[in-house]
Image (cartoon, grey):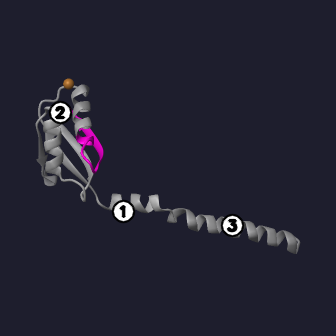
């Protein structure tokens, strides 16, 4: 390998290295990391659901709450597992939003019952 081509290879590797360092430092990723650090999951007992349509109504009501990032609802178990940002909302506020928004009564279940 000539000196010239070795210099070219070194320059390419250095370019990749700089891009690799700069990319993870982008702000949106830092924000995502901060949000997931505050992410919490709560389990809500939801009474009266009988089908997938009921689940969808509960899911929509829960997702309207600011800070809720993920909702898994099952009419078979009568439960909603909600992931939320604990800096923005609380399990009881989410339960109230589900009760008011979907018409199905939601109650906070202790994590220990899980
Ligand atoms: Cu239904």
Q: Is residue 105 above or below residue 109?
A: above
Is 64 part of what is drawn in magenta? yes
* Distance of label 3 from label 1 (alpha carbons): 29 Å
At mark 1, the secondary structure is helix
Is any part of residue 39 visible from this angle? yes
Q: Position of residue 94 (x, y in %)?
A: 18, 46
The residue pinned by badge 3 equals 15
Q: Position of residue 13 (x, y in %)?
A: 70, 67
At mark 2, the secondary structure is helix
Q: Position of residue 114 (x, y in %)?
A: 17, 49
Magenta extent: 62-76
Disc 2 and disc 1 in contact, CB within 8 angstroms: no
* Distance of label 3 from label 2 (alpha carbons): 54 Å
Is 9 placed left or right of 51 in the picture?
A: right
- Residue 56's image quarter? top left
Q: What label does residue 102 carry, if any?
A: 2
Residue at screen point 12% across, 30% down? 48
Question: Dot 3, how many residues are within 10 Å of its Cα: few (below 14), some (14-19), or many (20+)?
Answer: few
The residue pinned by badge 1 equals 34
Is any part of residue 78 visible from this angle? no
Residue at screen point 62% across, 64% down? 19
* Residue sitting farthest toward the bottom: 3
Is 63 placed left or right of 113 in the picture?
A: right
* Pointer 3 or 2: first along the chain: 3
């Amino acid at each position: 390998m000539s000196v010239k081509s070795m210099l070219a290879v070194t320059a390419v590797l250095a370019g990749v290295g700089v891009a690799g360092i700069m990319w993870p430092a982008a702000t949106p990723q830092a924000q995502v990391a901060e949000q997931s650090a505050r992410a919490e999951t709560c389990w809500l007992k939801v009474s009266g659901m009988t089908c997938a349509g009921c689940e969808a109504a509960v899911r929509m009501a829960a997702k309207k709450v600011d800070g809720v990032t993920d909702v898994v609802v099952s009419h078979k178990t009568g439960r909603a597992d909600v992931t939320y940002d604990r800096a923005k909302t609380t399990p009881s506020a989410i339960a109230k939003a589900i009760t008011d928004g979907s018409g199905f009564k939601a109650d906070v279940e202790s994590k220990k019952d899980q």
